[in-house]
Amino acid sequence: MDVFSRVNITTVSLLFLSLLAGAQTPSSSNEDSTRRLKEVIVTYQAGNKTPVTYQDLNMKVLDDKNTGQEPSFLLSETPAVTVYSDAGNMQGYSYYRMRGMDQTRINTTLDGMPLNEPEDQGAYFSNYPDILNSVSRLQVQRGVGTSKNGAASYAGSVQLFGPEAGDTPSTNIGLGYGSYNSFRVFAEHQTAVRNNKSLYVRGSQVYTDGYKYNSFNNSQSVFVSGGLYHDKSTWKLNVMAGHQQNGMAWLPVADTLIAKDRRTNANTKAEKDRFFQGLVQLQHIWRPTIYTSITSSVYYTYLNGGYDFDLNNFLGTASDGNLFNYGFRSHFGGFFTNYSLTHDHFRWTSGVHGNMYTRGHTGTDNWLGELYQNRGYKHDISGFSKIEYDLGRVTLYGDLQYRYTTFDYKGSVSFDKMNWHFLNPKGGINFAAGNTLSIYYSIGRTGREPTRNDIFGGNDDLVADSTGKAAIFNQDAESVVDQELGFRFRKGNLAIDLNGYYMNFDNEIVLNGQLGPNGLLLTNKVKSSYRTGVELHVGYQLKAFTFTNNSSFNHSRIKEQSVAFTPVLTPALIINQEVAWQRKDLGLALSGRYQQGAYIDFANEAMTADYVLLNARAQYTWKGCTLSLFINNLTSASYYNDGNVEADGTRKYFVQAPRNMYVAFKYSF
């Protein structure tokens, strides 16, 4: 963490906390204040009448399962989501895919603020360790969904919502320890709403040696959130910062080496990374009338860090101590404001969003010194308007977004500024067949620009072609038309969500199973492709037992000339089944996951094998103390769910951990 980042976050935090301490106390009840806080950011969520495919995660269950692991592993328990980690266990870098599409195609927000990095469009939970400890609500939308701020909601979206104050204060202190010297320590405190003010503070330390050799993760994070509540307006501030250091393990391992030792790390011990990332978000909601509200937010994110790269090792030759370092420093600031009108039969919301982003890239050799500097500039502006109109049992839905984004580059090679325009219409209908059943259909289109890595062909510093001009690999946008048909059933203790989807792509940018010159995944542009499937969520409670199923079937095809094949890392069948038992203060649960094999190369000649994963947990609570035991991969299944094929035919995989354990203790008062 450098001086600039410390000053920015500390100064803003102190200013706002001083404001909290000195604020006047207008006359309004604590109950009303709490209700207003919970309504601060709801603009982009789907409701029970919105005809899109979504799932609100049960935060009590999520909290029971949360040990500080990467959120990707908890998201993988929802339909159509796959996950793998670099280190093999649940801490450190992990990645998830939705309907076979990676994180750069999944919009991620916190209280409406974009978390995706604009250049590469990925959202990295690892930069905010233990973030789920401070999340009060979480909604996953699959498909294009509703209009969002930031990166395109292409495969879907993950919406996180910050802490919410209540009528009583609470304090939680927790610690845990498990396999591979993994541990977490955290403390958090939430005040009640008193004198129209609230404050939330959390700090966490997470560490693991990693399952693979030399794949440690050492991370710290803080989250501060405060609120001011007046009769017609609410102010809220979020400050979050994370710092991490890792032993690198992002290269897949050859199957011949895995056969000798499954803990083999294809990266060298000398390769490490270190990153700091912090954000500040100030939100305001104003209710001029009982029917209208205006929600506004400004935000800023700062990132600084880099990672080491052993080129000799990457090329398969002996390491000689020479390391290359990729360094990054970025500034990301923006705003959004939304106007909402809610009446008896309709809900109408319109809004605008804009941001500016710049990231400096530095390449340094530890023998030769600095080799290059360049800078990328990414700016984005968008506006949307959506309406839900009720006609008895029928709800009509319309949503139209315009988005304009630009990318520019300053370096040693001349570059022509790129820009893209997207008009993203969506519409649908929801029919309430009765008090327990609703049926919906929606169709929507969205477009997405290529990432910097797609444009540069995996190069961090832009190279020139034979004529001296910039070598551009892909600057064409991709688009998708997504159709969703499903039903939602609620009766007593039974909940069923079943949906089918058909996503038809134009110029889809897909992984080709290869690694670029800096080790990043490479992509190809394909003219014709589609993804279709069925997804199911079932929840049923029978006395002390709870049964939960999240399953999906996917059929995806790419057509190139006269050849049709399956996209990489897209398993056809995934089944998640959990049985939980709760009796007074004792809880037990057993969960199973079946994931069918998936291709790891464009030629569809190599693939991961099917696997079954069994996990168990037990929890006992007594007088505010909760003791939990987690046993992951009970059968010690040998599996991997990602990899690639080298040009010489060598098959490489990301090995995941065998049976491992974790014990957690939490004291709440």
Image (spheres, helix red, strand yellow):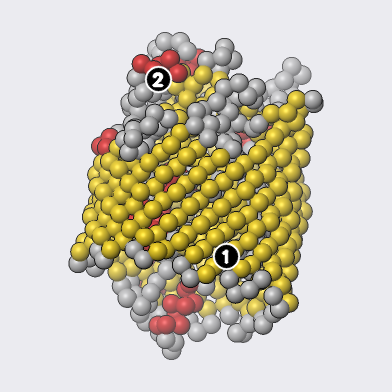
**Residue 436 is at least partly visible in this image:** yes
Q: Quadrant of the N terminus?
A: top left
In terms of depth relative to the viewer, which is nearer, 455 or 494?
494
Image spot of residue 432 (x, y percent) = 66, 71
Identify the mark nearer the N-term, 1 or 2. 2
Q: Secondary structure at mark 1?
A: strand
Q: Residue at x 36, y 16 (%)?
A: 260
Q: Secondary structure at mark 2?
A: helix
Q: Residue furthest front?
A: 542
In terms of depth relative to the viewer, which is nearer, 564 or 573?
573
Image spot of residue 287 (x, y percent) = 58, 80
**Residue 241 is at least partly visible in this image:** no
As displayed, is residue 191 above or below residue 25?
Answer: above
| Residue at mark 2 | 258
Query: In the rendered view, does 560 fall on the left or right side of 598?
Result: right
In which quadrant of the rendered view does residue 191 lie? bottom left
Mark 1 to mark 2 CA distance (whole Å): 46 Å
| Residue at mark 1 | 489
Residue type, mark 1 in image: Phe
Image spot of residue 480 (x, y percent) = 73, 46
Q: Quadrant of the C terminus?
A: bottom left
Residue type, mark 2 in image: Ile
| Image disc number at residue 635 | none
Query: In the rendered view, does 112 fall on the left or right side of 424?
Result: left
